[in-house]
Amino acid sequence: EEPRLPYQVNTIRYNKIEGLLPVHFLIENGEYQYFYDITCKEPLFDQMKNRKYTVKEIRTILSDLYRCIHVMEEYLLDINFLMVEPEYIFFDKKKHAYCFCFYPEKKGTFETAFRGLLEYFMNFLDYQDESTVVLVFSMYQKARNRNTSFAEIMQEFCEIKEPVKTSEKLLEKP
């Protein structure tokens, strides 16, 4: 008989959650093994190896992250289990959007991982593009302030008011 799964695991197992990679499980000796479907997806880590980030790319990644978190909140999923390290962020070539891994056994906080993502961006900036440098360094400075939330950072730097769902984006006029 299958062991009783915690709420977070059951939620990602039985629901298709926009912005999260689909996951399949194996349970062996009471241990969960997670298998993420990355078909037709490119890791952010590989995507940016030989080039520099632009303001538009950073805003796209972070807007997709913000949208994913908003959807996760609807399912009462804990954002601390969201993997935002570059090797766990994937670009879905079919949907032209970034997807994230949800790993219920992840240690640490979202805030710490988010600061790590911003530090990663700093290593791959086009330092000739002042707007990109100012954006990332300003966001990083705000992220280091424990009184500033991720939502506040997104609203200030990525001009996000309310997340737009994919279905609503499809209805927008070009």
Image: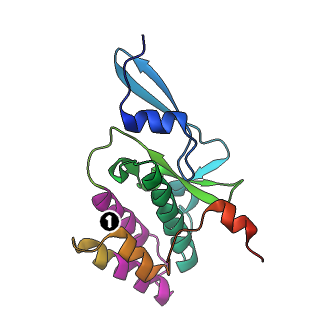
- Identified at 45% across, 48% down, the residue is 75
Say whether residue 16 is magenta: no
Q: Is residue 20 visible?
A: yes
- Name the residue at 58% across, 42% down: 16
Q: Seen in the image, is 101 located left or right of residue 94?
A: left
Give the x, y percent position of residue 58. 51, 72
Residue named by callout 1? 115
- Image spot of residue 92 (x, y percent): 64, 53
Residue occupying image coordinates x 22% and y 73%: 147
Label 1 packing within 10 angstroms: few (<14), some (14-19), many (20+): some
Task: Look at the image and tell me in which quarter the C terminus lies.
Answer: bottom right
Residue interval drawn in magenta = 110-139
In this view, 88 is above or below 167:
above
Farthest residue toward the bottom?
130
As drawn, is 173 to the left or to the right of 82? right
Q: Amino acid at mark 1?
A: Arg
| Whether residue 83 is situated above or below residue 70 in the rendered picture | above
Disc 1 secondary structure class: helix
Asked if the magenta segment contains residue 129, the reply would be: yes
Chief SS of the magenta region: helix
Measured from the top left, where is residue 73 in percent x and y? 43, 55
Q: Position of residue 32 (x, y in %)?
A: 39, 26
Q: Is residue 128 visible?
A: no
**The quadrant where residue 114 appears:** bottom left
* Front position in the image: 60 or 68: 68
